Amino acid sequence: MDQSLSLTQHIHASPERVWAVITDIRNAPGTLSGVEAVQLLTDGSYGEGTRWRETRKMFGRSETVEVWVDSAEPPRSTTIRAAQGGADYSTRFSLANRDGGTDLTLTFGATMSKPTAAGRVLAAVFGRLGMAASRKALAKDLADIAAKAESAR
């Protein structure tokens, strides 16, 4: 079962400034209130192949997942991916110049990579709850990114 959602936040900052915030992985815990820690696994600047471990608090517990950059087109879009618990996750950030600022659209998707019969039943029952929690967390991420990008104007 595939699940997806898309959210857009208008940010009063240039696409280049927003790009700098979303690609500053090392400082993500200071920007994103939902991120507790980041451990970079690759050297160099942000780009395709960059990998890190990210610890977030979800459902009252800390979870660590390895994340990697699948694609990057500065300062227009980037897609990051992760895999955990039999699911593949994809998050795409798209930046569009609008009204002297930036529309930042986040598109999140989850796909079960190895669905079992029991897994499909659980996904059908709990998938909506998980996506509702994800929507709330991702909306907070967008607000946090906006606050950081706008504070540097």
Image: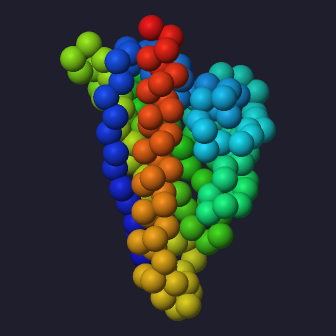
Describe residue 121's horizontal placement relative to residue 82 as left or right: left
Where does residue 82 sit, x and y in percent of width and height? 60, 54
What residue do we see at 37% from left, 14% from top? 14
Considering depth in this image, is 80 or 139 the residue closer to the camera? 139
At 45% from the left edge and 83% from the top edge, which residue is drawn?
Answer: 125
Q: Residue furthest bottom?
A: 117
* Residue at the spot 53% in from the left edge and 57% down from the top edge: 89
How many marks overall? 0
Q: Quadrant of the C terminus?
A: top left
The image quarter in which residue 76 lies? top left
Above or below: residue 45 compared with residue 105: above
The spot of residue 37 in percent (x, y) is 74, 40
Q: Is residue 54 above or below residue 47?
A: below
Q: Is residue 113 something one can see in this rendering?
A: yes
Q: Is residue 8 left or right of residue 42?
A: left
> Is residue 111 among what the camera can see?
no
